[in-house]
Image (spheres, rainbow, N blue to C red):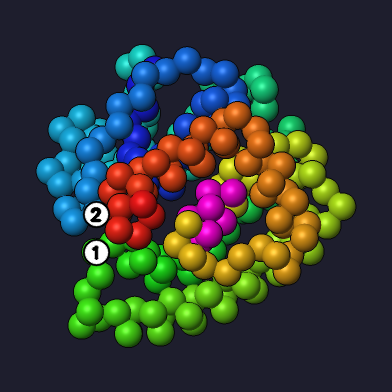
Amino acid sequence: MTLYSGPLSLFSRKVEIALAEKGLAHERVMVPFTQTEGYQPKHPAVLAANPKGQVPVLADGDLTLFDSTVILDYLEDAYPTPPLFPRDAAGRARCRLAELEADEIVMPDVRPLMHRSEPPDPARLEAQEAGARQAEESLRGHWRRLDARLAGRDFLFDGLTVADIAVFMTVLFALRLHGPGLEAFPALAAWYERLSARPAFAKVLAEVAAADRELSPALFG
C-alpha cells in the first residue's frame, strides 16, 4: 500500500491518521511542496491517478483511489478492524455527514486565514485580514456548536471515527493559522487535547509544525 501525501495537505493527513489508527503498514511518498509554488510541478504518479492532480492518492494493489472521503470509506470496507465508523447504518450516515461538515462547511471558513502562512503581499494584506476576521467570527460559531456537541463525550460518536479525524484536522489548521483559540470552549478543548495525545495524531501535529518551520521560517521559526 502506498500513500501519496503532502506536508501541509489537511486531507492527506486525515488518511495518514486513519492508516495509523488501523495499524495498516504502508509506504508514504511525500510530494514536494513550497509556499511560493505549491505542488508545482505536480508529481507524475498523482497526475496519473487523480484528474485534479491533488493528494491524497492511495494505491492498494491494483486499486488506486483519490479523495480522502473515498479513501476512508475504502479503508473501512477493506480493513474493518478496528472500525472508524459506527456499526449501524444511521450512525454511519451521521458520521459521514459530520466528516462532510468538517471538510465542506467548517474548512471554507479556515481558507481565508491561509495567507498567514504564505509570503506576505503588502498590497493585499489589509483586505486579506479583513476577510480573515470575518471568517474567525464564523469559526467561533463552529467551535460553539462543536463544544455543545462534545459536552460530556470523549468522541463525536461512541468511539473514535473519521468524523473526529476530519474535525481535528480542521481545528488544527485553524489554530496553526492563528484562528480563534479554544479557551472559551472547554469540551472542544478537552477533546482536542485527548486526541492530540494519541500517537497517530501527535505524529501529524509534530510533522505539520516541522513543515511550517521549514516552509515558512519567518512566520513559524
Q: Main secondary structure of the magenta part?
A: helix
Q: CA distance from mark 1 to mark 2?
A: 7 Å
Q: Is residue 34 above or below residue 137?
A: above
What segment is highlighted magenta in the picture? 168-175
Q: In this orientation, which residue lies closer to the viewer: 93 or 52? A: 52
Seen at 34% across and 35% down, the residue is 5
Label 2 secondary element:
loop
Disc number for residue 51:
none
Disc number for residue 119:
1
Seen at 25% across and 70% down, the residue is 120
Crowding at mark 1 (Cα within 10 Å: few <14, some 14-19, many 20+): few
Mark 1 in CB contact with mark 2 (< 8 angstroms)? yes
Amino acid at pointer 1: Pro
The answer to which image quadrant residue 67 occupies is: top left
Query: Residue 184, image x and y in percent?
Result: 73, 69
Work out which quarter of the rendered image holds the N terminus and state it: top left
